[in-house]
Structures are given as structure tokens and as C-alpha cells.
Amino acid sequence: QQQVKQSPQSLIVQKGGISIINCAYENTAFDYFPWYQQFPGKGPALLIAIRPDVSEKKEGRFTISFNKSAKQFSLHIMDSQPGDSATYFCAASDTNFGNEKLTFGTGTRLTIIP
Amino acid sequence: AAGVIQSPRHLIKEKRETATLKCYPIPRHDTVYWYQQGPGQDPQFLISFYEKMQSDKGSIPDRFSAQQFSDYHSELNMSSLELGDSALYFCASSLVGSGDTQYFGPGTRLTVL
């Protein structure tokens, strides 16, 4: 049972456009929600993360929107560039008891076309 | 800045052989996590260690074991390898109290023939 559901599975966006990836979670104990970017054959790299006490967090071209009541969060990439082409994973963890293992979504393969 | 180091980067083994993967966390990080990522899959949590003690266990087969040593490096030992063990194995490290960020290594690609 996938505890973190991610969509879409793949996404094609024109250069300069906005890329939007959505995630939904089941476990209400989750209190930390990071997004990771992964290039082929490389390890996941943290992009941006959010906690439930805020509804939005922005870092450069990357914004996380968080809806606690709906148990959903999304990543927006503004002014998408060809270098953003990668697989993106949302993740969640329950950090309250030192149990911080990440539960990942299934990933979104993003392709930015010129 | 120093990153997580994993060795070897690539490993090819035959069925029923054993493999040992090593992870060197970022200096001063006290927690190590191991994840397995199959082709086209999301990373799955295997096991974690905090201050050299096992802190959590996920879907790790009984054929696998791991430990964290006094210098905080960790090793994942895999025995009786099966074809289905072919995957990317990532180690991540973090520092308790520093915001919960896990930093991933470059991974070890294990191929079982």
C-alpha cells in the first residue's frame, strides 16, 4: 500500500513554463515533507522541504504548497529549464520519535522541452 | 562541503554470493539510513542507525544485515544474493536536531547475475 501517492507519473513542460507535481499522504503522523530531485544513476538531492505549520514555502524557482486538511502537497517549478529535467520524488516522515525514515512517492519523470 | 561516500559504486555478483556495501556519512552526522531502489522504482527504506545502534527497520530481508561502527561508517551485508536484489542501494546521513534533512550518497549499483 503506497502511503504517499504521487502524480503525474511523467510530465512534459515547455521551457519557461510551470511544472506542477502533486502528492497525497495517508499517515497523519507525518510532519516533514521534502522533495528530492534525482538524475539517472545519481542519488536523490534535497530540493526543498516543508512542515505542516506553514501552507507555502518558496526557495528560488521552487515552491511547495501544503494543504494539511486535504493531506496534500505539491511542488511548483517556475520558469522551468531544460536542466530541471529529472525525476522528482516527494517524501514524508514522522519525526516525532526519532523515527525519521522517508516514505517516498512513486516519482515523476519531468522533461522540459525547448 | 563533504558529502556521503559510498563504495563500491558498482558491484557485480553471482547468485548465492555475498556482498558488502560501505557508507561513510557526512562528518559529524550521527544517523545513517539505507535505501534500496529498484529500476524505475522509488527508494525503499531498509534500516537505520543512530549513534551506532539500530534505530529502525523496514523491509529488509533476513539475508541482509547492517551495522554502524565507532567511526560512524556503516556496512550493509547481503548474503545468498538473488536476482531480485539487483538495485541501486543508497545510504543517507543526517544529524539529529538539525532539521531532519537526509543527505544521500551517490549509491552502489548492485547487479546479481
Image (spheres, coloured by chain):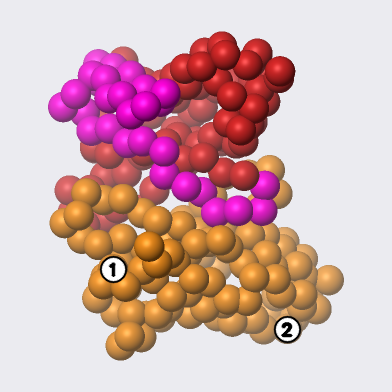
Display colour for chain B: orange
x and y, in percent, of residue B76 in the image: 51, 76
What segment is highlighted magenta in the picture? Answer: A40-69
Q: Which residue is mark 2?
A: B17
Residue B65 in sight from this viewpoint:
no
Say which residue label 1 marks: B29
Query: Disc 1 versus disc 2: distance between alpha carbons?
Result: 32 Å
Could you tell me which secondary element the residue under label 2 belongs to? loop
The residue at 33%/80% (across/down) is B72
Residue B55 located left or right of residue A84: left
Chain at numbered mark 1: B
Q: Secondary structure at mark 1?
A: loop
Three-letter amino acid code at the position of disc 2: Glu
Which of disc 2 and disc 1 is earlier in sequence?
2
Q: Residue at x 40, y 80 (%)?
A: B73
x and y percentages locating residue A89 in the rendered image:
50, 37
Regarding residue A21, the answer to whether it shows in the image is yes
Up-down relation of residue B58 to residue B22 (above or below): above
B10 to the left or right of A90 = right
Chain A tint as drawn: red
For the residue marked with disc 1, what is the amino acid? His
User: x, y (%) of residue B104?
Assistant: 46, 57
> Measured from the top left, where is residue B6 in percent x and y?
53, 72
Same chain for labels 1 and 2? Say yes or no. yes
Nearer the observer: mark 1 or 2; the answer is 1
Q: Is residue B53 left or right of residue A109?
A: left
Q: Is residue A100 above or below residue B75?
A: above
Residue reaching furthest right?
B113
